[in-house]
Image (tube, rainbow, N blue to C red):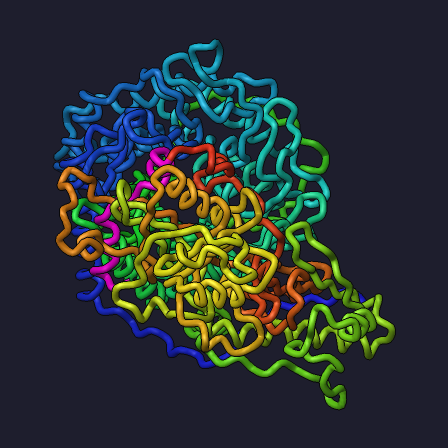
């Protein structure tokens, strides 16, 4: 009997379909989109221009080199007024012709492209080169209309060619794949360039060039740009895995070896697929469509598990590479509409919509059971993009309501006085001082087009193709004179039968003879994501009865229980972090009946975990309020299922911290006279959390903070969890107990080491400084800002795997009850290191793997040795503006 896989889909009450939206209501929403755009654009022009981007919390421009580095994200900034260039064609689409003309004049007079600065080739291509070409297309269209831009003489095109020539040195590699970065002034060769030493790039970074470079060649008549882009695409195609026809995420630009062999449709690969199909649309070359269709067939065979899109390994495409999805894959339903494959587009979009309604925004990454994996949301437009294309394809007013939801959430949760602020954590509503240029370039285009009538749009959008940054390139470029590209080295396997491909998009009226068809596809998915829907009892075959061992009765240190697990084919794997992983191989069971019992045991563990999810507690806050912090440092902490409920306290618990002796807190506290009236610091390990709490409570402590004993652990890379009890009543524990990982705990310990007396506030969320100090003399010169270490507290579950697993802890000699946190569609549950009684579902693996940043660049590595950093450096690393929290309070988050 093969290992058993489970994908648990919730079935339940179904919502009624949406009603048709009136023309007046669409008009009102369209006008609201324009007002929102004006709010964002005008604040950029008033407070940030000529800087690249607006910092909406502090109402100033982000200038590279003047603000603390954000790592690779800043490679998009080149001191070339990025947001203004990225917004040019949006102004025309929204009928802001006067503003467009003024913006073009500003670009021509103020923007320099020869800055001595290293920028991302990918970001500069799609945002700046694409923005200049989109602006040029609009200027030519307006000039031909005879009323506007009569003075225009292709100045934006000349700038675009200048920029294209500055990007070309990056393509000087043996493979033709571009370096990921280039110096706008010096290129990639020589020490003055400060680049050119990189060896790897992401697939999307190298494969998302063809639209802009081909358009530049066709506009200017210079074939060099299109030739370089085609060469890069040819090389990527040649390096695909020939059996799976998939490409990896990261490739060596010199050798062509895949550095990361996981494959999906999200970050690192996404726009490579998009540009293959759109290159066919824009340029009319059948080769691009052939390649796209081969890739698409493999995507639907291996990656698509409707409604999910899960990464796989290119050499073993049946083996999942990860069990979470990133928000960039939200573009894919829109691409499927362009392909003509509407059904899976509807299904995946509905899943994304339900996740959006669950968390207000799409988290940067979320698990296969739709919980937060990475909590950030930088106002990405991909979901709005797919919403627009699905509305165009189906005419279903349901997608108008989805657009309304996007707008309402932006106004409720992201709008601030100086623009729209990215969400630092979708769970708490905290903001980040960031408004990326793509928000103006893409979000408002798609929302405007969603609600606009044809006579509201100043040109026919069907005459243009949208780039990945939503810049508009005219389809007439396919007929523009250009030098023929070098003949492709097409192998015999590329001589494909035309019958294998759809050369046109199907008529959507024929796809949907029944208007209810899209709704029928959506309803099961809505039920799957909506945890409030009732969950059916697990199926049990007649006569099979209950398994001999109940999940809630299992004790990790009971030899009899371990023997029963062995007979059911369940074995134990000891993990490095002290946990035990239960793995079920049905083939190792003593009989078929025992194997069935093992399956039921694993399933029951998940069911019990699902029941306890209703008791899930949100993260808590530890705010350092003493000098010199004054409430500006906030550490996100894991809660306990016992003790004081901080969510019911309007003031929280405030006190000075003292290290307990013994540090483990597992015996009577020796320094009780110092602990009394203070908040005790404890180390994780050696005993149950509840036991630690009882010891410090007996010593007179008013609260406790447990710091992880796993050196280098951080909530940046590991999920937080709830601390459970010890299997007996915890009603006697009346103080609050919170948990910090090692890195965050070191921030507190370093502060205590340097300042001797450190006062903290334990609460359910960060407090306004005025509320903390209540009129105390806090210098006005202190910055009104909070530095918050908010990090994901969700748990990464295992997706589909070849075995059923449950992770528990072997360190505590207590019984193991069902898990109390996230579970996955596959049978994996995990527990925290100490609490094996009310075990918590942690990540499916001990530590989640590092992944490429969703900006297509690698995230900078965090310094895991926090003790080597000064408090000032830590403050700089965690800086956050107070206005974010004022807005959070205002929105009652």
Q: From the viewer's perspective, is residue 479 above or below residue 420?
A: above
**Residue located farthest toward the bottom when viewing the structure as drawn:** 543
The magenta region covers 871-893
Residue 862 in sight from this viewpoint: no
User: Measured from the top left, where is residue 881 in percent x and y?
Assistant: 25, 44
Front residue of 275/775: it is 775
Q: Which residue: 49% across, 52% down?
A: 707
User: Measured from the top left, where is residue 127 in percent x and y?
Assistant: 35, 33
Q: Is residue 657 left or right of residue 112?
A: right
Residue 649 in sight from this viewpoint: yes
Q: Is residue 43 left or right of residue 584?
A: left
Q: Which residue: 50% across, 43% down?
A: 267
Q: Give the main secondary structure, helix, strand or loop, of the magenta stretch.
A: helix
Q: Quadrant of the C terminus?
A: bottom left
Q: Which residue: 33% across, 68% down?
A: 647
Residue 397 figure quarter: bottom left
**Residue located farthest toward the right when viewing the structure as drawn:** 590
Front residue of 778/61: it is 778
Number of numbered markers: 0
Front residue of 235/752: it is 752
Q: Which residue: 60% across, 18% down?
A: 174
Q: Is residue 125 left or right of residue 230?
A: left
Residue 253 figure quarter: top right
Q: Quadrant of the N terminus?
A: bottom right
Q: Is residue 673 left or right of residue 781?
A: right
Q: Is residue 881 magenta?
A: yes
Q: Is residue 327 magenta?
A: no
User: Measured from the top left, where is residue 322 in percent x and y?
Assistant: 60, 51
User: Measured from the top left, where is residue 776 in percent x and y?
Assistant: 15, 51
């Amino acid at each position: 009997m093969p290992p058993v896989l489970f994908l648990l889909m919730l079935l339940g009450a179904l919502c009624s379909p949406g009603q048709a939206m009136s023309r007046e209501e669409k008009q009102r929403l369209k006008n609201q989109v324009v007002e929102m755009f004006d709010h964002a654009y005008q604040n950029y022009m008033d407070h940030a221009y000529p800087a690249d981007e607006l910092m909406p919390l502090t109402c100033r421009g982000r200038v590279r080199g003047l603000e603390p580095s954000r790592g690779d994200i800043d490679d998009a900034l080149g001191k070339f007024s990025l947001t203004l260039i990225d917004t040019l064609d949006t102004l025309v689409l929204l009928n802001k012709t006067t503003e467009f003309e003024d913006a073009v004049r500003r670009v021509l007079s103020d923007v320099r492209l020869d800055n001595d600065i290293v920028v991302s080739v990918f970001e500069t291509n799609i945002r700046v080169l694409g923005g200049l070409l989109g602006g040029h297309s609009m200027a030519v269209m307006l000039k031909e209309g005879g009323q506007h831009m009569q003075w225009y003489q292709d100045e934006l095109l000349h700038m675009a060619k200048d920029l294209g020539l500055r990007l070309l040195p990056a393509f000087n590699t043996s493979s033709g794949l571009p370096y990921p970065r280039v110096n706008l002034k010096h290129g990639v060769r020589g020490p003055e360039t400060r680049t050119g030493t990189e060896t790897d790039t992401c697939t999307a970074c190298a494969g998302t060039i063809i639209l802009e470079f081909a358009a530049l060649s066709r506009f200017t008549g210079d074939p060099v740009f299109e030739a370089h882009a085609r060469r890069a695409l040819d090389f990527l195609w040649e390096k695909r895995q020939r059996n799976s026809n998939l490409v990896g995420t990261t490739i060596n630009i010199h050798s062509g070896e895949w550095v990361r062999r996981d494959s999906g449709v999200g970050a690192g690969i996404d726009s490579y697929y998009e540009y293959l199909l759109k290159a066919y649309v824009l340029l009319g070359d059948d080769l691009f469509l052939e390649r796209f269709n081969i890739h698409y067939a493999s995507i639907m065979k291996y990656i698509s598990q409707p409604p999910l899109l899960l990464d796989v390994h290119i050499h073993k495409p049946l083996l999942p590479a990860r069990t979470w999805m990133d928000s960039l894959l939200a573009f894919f339903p829109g691409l499927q509409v362009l392909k003509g494959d509407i059904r899976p587009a509807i299904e995946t979009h509905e899943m994304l919509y339900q996740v959006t309604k669950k968390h207000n925004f799409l988290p940067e990454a979320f698990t296969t059971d739709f919980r937060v994996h990475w909590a950030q949301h930088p106002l990405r437009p991909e979901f709005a993009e797919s919403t627009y294309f699905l509305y165009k394809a189906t005419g279903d007013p349901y997608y108008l309501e989805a657009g309304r939801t996007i707008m309402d959430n932006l106004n409720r949760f992201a709008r601030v006085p100086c623009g729209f602020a990215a969400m630092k954590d979708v769970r708490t509503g905290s903001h980040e001082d960031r408004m990326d240029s793509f928000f103006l370039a893409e979000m408002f285009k798609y929302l405007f087009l969603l609600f606009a009538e044809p006579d509201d749009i100043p040109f026919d959008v069907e005459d243009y193709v949208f780039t990945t940054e939503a810049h508009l390139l005219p389809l007439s470029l396919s007929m523009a004179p250009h030098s023929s590209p070098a003949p492709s080295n097409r192998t015999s396997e590329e001589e494909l039968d035309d019958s294998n491909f759809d050369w046109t998009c199907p008529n959507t009226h024929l796809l949907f003879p029944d208007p209810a068809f899209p709704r029928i596809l959506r309803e099961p998915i809505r039920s799957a994501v909506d945890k409030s829907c009732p969950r059916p009892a697990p199926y049990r075959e007649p006569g099979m009865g209950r398994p001999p061992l109940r999940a809630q009765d299992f004790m990790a240190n009971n030899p009899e229980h371990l023997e029963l697990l062995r007979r059911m084919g369940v074995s134990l794997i000891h993990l490095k972090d002290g946990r035990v992983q239960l793995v079920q191989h049905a083939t190792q069971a003593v009989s078929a009946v025992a194997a069935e019992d093992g399956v039921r045991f694993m399933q029951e563990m998940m069911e019990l975990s699902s029941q306890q999810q209703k008791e899930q507690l949100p993260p808590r806050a530890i705010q350092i309020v003493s000098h010199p912090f004054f409430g500006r440092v906030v550490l996100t902490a894991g809660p306990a299922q016992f003790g004081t409920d901080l969510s019911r306290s309007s003031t929280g618990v405030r006190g000075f911290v003292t290290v307990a002796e013994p540090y483990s807190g597992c015996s009577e506290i020796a320094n009780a006279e110092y602990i009394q009236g203070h908040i005790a610091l404890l180390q994780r390990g050696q005993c149950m959390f509840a036991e630690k709490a009882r010891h410090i409570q007996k010593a007179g402590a008013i609260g406790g903070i447990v710091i992880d004993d796993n050196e280098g652990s951080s909530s940046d890379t590991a999920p937080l969890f709830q601390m459970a009890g010890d299997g007996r009543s915890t009603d006697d524990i009346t103080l609050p107990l919170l948990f910090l990982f090692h890195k965050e705990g070191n921030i507190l310990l370093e502060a205590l080491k340097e300042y001797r007396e450190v006062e903290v506030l334990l609460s359910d969320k960060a407090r306004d400084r005025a509320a903390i100090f209540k009129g105390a003399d806090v210098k006005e010169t202190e910055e009104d800002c909070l530095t918050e270490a908010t990090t994901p507290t969700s748990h990464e579950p295992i997706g589909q795997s070849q075995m059923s697993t449950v992770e528990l802890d072997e360190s505590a000699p207590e019984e193991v009850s069902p898990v109390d946190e996230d579970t996955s569609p596959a049978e994996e549950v995990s527990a925290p290191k100490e609490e094996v009684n009310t075990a918590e579902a942690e990540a499916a693996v001990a530590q989640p793997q590092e992944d490429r940043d969703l900006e297509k660049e690698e995230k900078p590595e965090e310094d895991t040795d926090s003790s080597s950093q000064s408090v000032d450096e830590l403050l700089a690393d965690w800086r956050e503006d107070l206005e974010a929290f004022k807005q959070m309070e205002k929105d009652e988050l």
